[in-house]
Amino acid sequence: MTYQNYSLKQLQQIDAAHHLHPFTDHKELREAGARVITHAKGPFIYDSEGTELLDGMAGLWCVNIGYGRDELAEAAYAQMKELPYYNSFFKCSTPTPVLLSKKLAEIAPRNVNQVFYGSSGSEANDTALRLVRHYWVLEGKPEKNRVISRKMAYHGSTIAGTSLGGMDAMHKQLNGAVPNIVHVMMPYAYELALPGESDHDFGLRAAKSVEDAIIEAGADKVAAFIGEPVMGAGGVKIPPASYWPEVQRICRKYDVLLMLDEVITGYGRTGEWFAAQTFGIEPDTITTAKALTSGYQPLSALLVGDRIASTLVEKGGEFNHGYTYSGHPVACAVALKNLEIIEQEGLVDRVRNDTGPYFARALQERIAGQDLVGEVRSIGLMGAIEIVKDKATKERFLPSGSAAVTVRDHAIANGMMLRATGDTMILSPPLIWTRDTIDMACERIGKALDLAQADLRSR
């Protein structure tokens, strides 16, 4: 029996009876009933009632080549028929992860040539943490095990991922984090810059918080710094141009490894294959997932720099870590075809030279002037809209986050799927968006802001 045999109400009742959703108030959801998404095509998703929504979040930051790509379904089908599964244990491999590893080494920064597979960004960050700490043990420095992260960072939902991240609400529910992880200020100029402070100076000050944490702990105790090139789930916080060069200089000065979380920014989002290339960063690890398969299969790839990989191979012996689905042949087949499509359709170049700049102009010209908008910012096809009560003072509506939810709800009601994070609206659309799609999005967002303003001012 297929879902078409059930009414929306029946599906909602079954969902409420048996399905625990991620990041959800389950009581609230079950009272309202879930929206059931049934199909999608190109940049649009459709619910069980036939409502069409322009997807401004690429699913969950991941569907870079859009929906309904038969090529990916066919790649999965062909691989399932030939070899649906075999593991990467027992000194075995399968062809697709071998070929995918070669491809990833070709498009990654030059110092990154090795790949370890999992099924999610959370798993990739768990692996990165284990690998970095193990590296220092192999180098005879087991005391170098502290990792510096940032407040409001998001590095996944596993115990290690939550601990690496800087989300207070997640830490409270964890009730005991992985030790030796500290969090410093985020490069969020809109709220944290001092009066009169330039973006350049703010970027240097934010980077200095990393150096201060290293000095406080002692460089001989610090293993690595981890950061998202652009903070995604924390609100698309784009650092000033001065930030990453200074962070990299600091890490090299104190012999601290540099870990990048590109689960969101990887595979074209910023107009390069990786945001490391956008910002000129030479990382020791890069965690990726999401857009690696455009979300069509669960797959993550931890890209490992030559420094760590050389030590692991030459001194490591057996690395006692791995997953049943590491290098899953079907997921890797889909990833290979997905990367091929991104190349064939020139999507990375298009984001860098066409749609990314157009997206930035459209947000500035059509959204930034709205009364509820304190700031818009973007990089590539990734953007944020700050929702405020007063543009001049940056005063927010109370309770915190309520205004952004109001905007989100009006956007969805007007055919635009957006996400609210705190007081910020965030966008991360499929890379197949065109100028026409961007115009459509701005029109619908603008209407949602007008309607939200009427609601909020009347309270």
Image: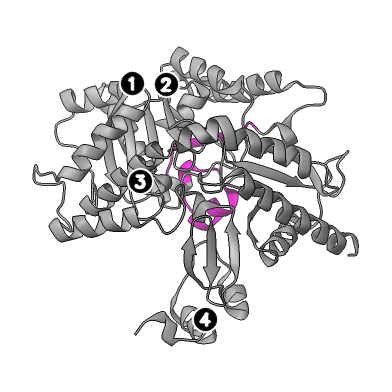
Q: Which residue is mark 1?
A: 111
The amino acid type, in three-letter code, at marker 3 is Asn
Q: Which residue is mark 2?
A: 282
- Which residues make up the magenta segment? 163-187
Distance Cα–Cα, label 2 vs label 4? 48 Å
Percent of width and height locating residue 169: 59, 54
The residue that appears at 90% across and 64% down in the rendered structure is 458
Percent of width and height locating residue 115: 27, 35
Distance Cα–Cα, label 4 vs label 1? 49 Å
Q: Which residue is mark 4?
A: 12
The residue that appears at 84% across and 57% down in the rendered structure is 453
Q: Assess whether residue 57 is covered by the magenta stretch.
A: no
> Which of the image's four quarters has the C terminus?
bottom right
| Closer-to-camera residue (449/147) | 449
At numbered mark 2, what does the secondary structure look like: helix, strand or loop? loop
| Closer-to-camera residue (140/82) | 82
Q: Which residue is mark 3?
A: 338
At numbered mark 1, what does the secondary structure look like: helix, strand or loop? loop
